[in-house]
Image (spheres, coloured by chain):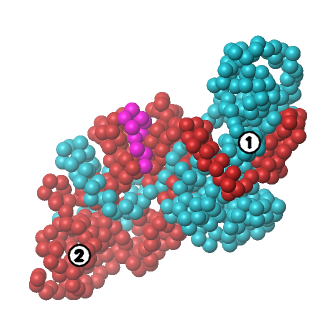
Chain colours: A red, B cyan
Amino acid sequence: MPPLTMTSSIKNKKFILASHPEGRVLPENFMLVEENLPPLRDNEVLIRHQWLSLDPYMRGRISPAKSYAQGVKIGDTMVGATVGVVEQSQSDKFQVGDVVLSATGWQLYGIANASQIMKVDASKVPSSAFVGILGMPGITAWTGLMNICEPKSGETVVVDAASGAVGAVVGQLAKIAGCRVVGIAGGAAKCEYVVKELGFDACVDHRSKTFAQDVTDALPAGIDCLFENVGGAIFELLLSKMNAFSRIALCGTVSEYNDDPYPNKVLRSILINRIKFQGFIVSDKLETWPGIREKLTELVIAGKLKFRESIAEGLEQAPQAFVGMLAGQNFGKQLVRISN
Amino acid sequence: MPPLTMTSSIKNKKFILASHPEGRVLPENFMLVEENLPPLRDNEVLIRHQWLSLDPYMRGRISPAKSYAQGVKIGDTMVGATVGVVEQSQSDKFQVGDVVLSATGWQLYGIANASQIMKVDASKVPSSAFVGILGMPGITAWTGLMNICEPKSGETVVVDAASGAVGAVVGQLAKIAGCRVVGIAGGAAKCEYVVKELGFDACVDHRSKTFAQDVTDALPAGIDCLFENVGGAIFELLLSKMNAFSRIALCGTVSEYNDDPYPNKVLRSILINRIKFQGFIVSDKLETWPGIREKLTELVIAGKLKFRESIAEGLEQAPQAFVGMLAGQNFGKQLVRISN
């Protein structure tokens, strides 16, 4: 067993939420406070934080609006992923000196139960990578791109916030998958970085006055996969370039996070509820029709499926019946009887 | 071989598109014309139409705007599915008297190649069913509900235009699948029909002044599957009731079809491009993280994935760095160095 330790002699500093932001977040929404740390309980470790990750999702956590996760309340320590060094341990699983990934937030020290932290091997990659490319942002990029977009070699993949922690990984993974990759980023320096350093095929600067035309020029074959981080006007423009049977992985709408209420209800709901929203045209899969028709026929003959018809008499009535149907005046399937 | 026949003695009447509608469709957008039918060519059949199906998709076909299918041009015969009786045949595959499903449009007679029509068995179900519950509308209902929504027993399924050709089948199939089914329809008669005749659990009349409250009352457990036919304000209200991990099969937006341009660009694009649009939160599938992290680590160590960090120095800088990140001032993953 590790020796009994007294954490109460250690002064901690931490940021608590002082107020919910109204619109744009201000530094004054957070307050720095000092405290003496309590003694460790069984199975707890004391972590000296080295790195704190700041991520756009935190904007949602400090809003009083409903989101997918429990919000931070006034007076709570701000949430966040950290990497740090174990300074004291009441757990058999962690030794002083271990480097661990934790979710202990905006503070100098964190106390966590051993079940809530993970030891990382920082011998081959810098420890900060475990809250970046090997942490939530990198895994987010992989999940949205590989599991939702499912890009095929030769397809065009677009990602906005392309130089960000998520976007940069999305684009590089898409290149590895054999895709043409176009990034959207703010400013020439970020665009140059994603093309020259990360190997994207092109990048469009959304701060340029010729943005709309530049997007069109960069996408001669439209978009097959859109990894969406931004929302707002950028999303609307990209949406107009989507190809048939394309996929959108909706990861965030950072351009809208400071607006209250969120301007695009469709995006907001799809995101926070993880909705799968899919358009379909039944004639795309004519090969499925015989099998489905057979099942429906069985149900109709068995009396398990009922149907009702609205009948217009004679070809001459077709235009009026069509106009009426669009106004909801039909009741059941609209037919025109042409002959007996 | 069937005998050589002369169709030129038969007078046909048909509706052609006279003008593209501007906003609301009017009967005057169509013109009735007469013609002598040409003689049949090899492999063609002459069909006397019994039934013409009228469907909302036709509104898109007569618009000059881009859609998923080739539009009807001025002077073209209006498109539409028909059921009819073969009157003459130059094909070995069809005999005079056969009942066939065809796509020969708004006219008394249709001439079609044998490869484009299908013989149907109207001995157990009325022939009109083949353009309704056993045709495109029924197969549409099955496809969207079973293949996109994938309802599970006990879930809540909502369908709007519930008494229509598609909606009525959606609701009944969802009941067979063990779901709670709530319809949205226009007027008390349609609502009564879907509950009493079709067996829906509830129906809400969208023409009622208490519609929003009625929807809330009818959906105590929210919506797991939405089969969307209507769009507009009804869709916006239903969207606000969606549950986490819910699914929307977007089949149509009939309330918007007479508007030009389409008011909801997101819906319109998802529909005509058959986009799969999916929101996701990476923390939903924590069990996938170790495997993904391992793959990312390999790529980082191999030098195939690069990353860049924006570092704020010291805990005190966290609020300002967070505010800056939301404004796009970071360049790469935003970190705060807490200690060395």
On screen, residue B200 versus residue A151, left or right, reads right
Above or below residue B186? Residue A216 is above
Residue B285 disc label: none
Residue identifier under label 2? A114
Q: Residues within 10 Å of mark 2 (few under 14, many from 20)?
A: many
Residue A149 highlighted magenta (yes or no): yes
At x 43%, y 49%, the residue is A148
Q: Is residue B80 visible?
A: no
Residue A282 location in percent, x, y? 61, 41
Q: Work out whether residue A41 or residue A111 is closer to the camera in this orientation and state it.
A: A41
Of the 4 image quadrants, the one containing the C terminus of chain B is bottom left
- Mark 1 vs 2: CB contact within 8 A: no
Is most of the magenta stretch helix, strand or loop? loop
Under circle 2, the secondary element is: helix
The amino acid sitting under disc 1 is Ser
At x 72%, y 69%, the residue is B214
On screen, residue A257 versus residue B202, left or right, reads left
At x 48%, y 55%, the residue is B279
Label 2 resides on the chain identified as A
On screen, residue A127 versus residue B273, left or right, reads left
Q: Work out whether residue A156 or residue A257 is closer to the camera in this orientation and state it.
A: A156
Residue A163 location in percent, x, y? 35, 46
Please report the bounds of the magenta region as a residue range. Answer: A148-157
Under circle 1, the secondary element is: loop
Residue identifier under label 1? B123
Above or below residue A288? Residue A78 is below
Label 1 resides on the chain identified as B
Above or below residue B197? Residue A202 is above
Q: Is residue B10 visible?
A: yes
Rounded to the nearest angstrom, the CA distance separating label 1 from label 2 is: 71 Å
Residue A34 highlighted magenta (yes or no): no
The amino acid sitting under disc 2 is Ala
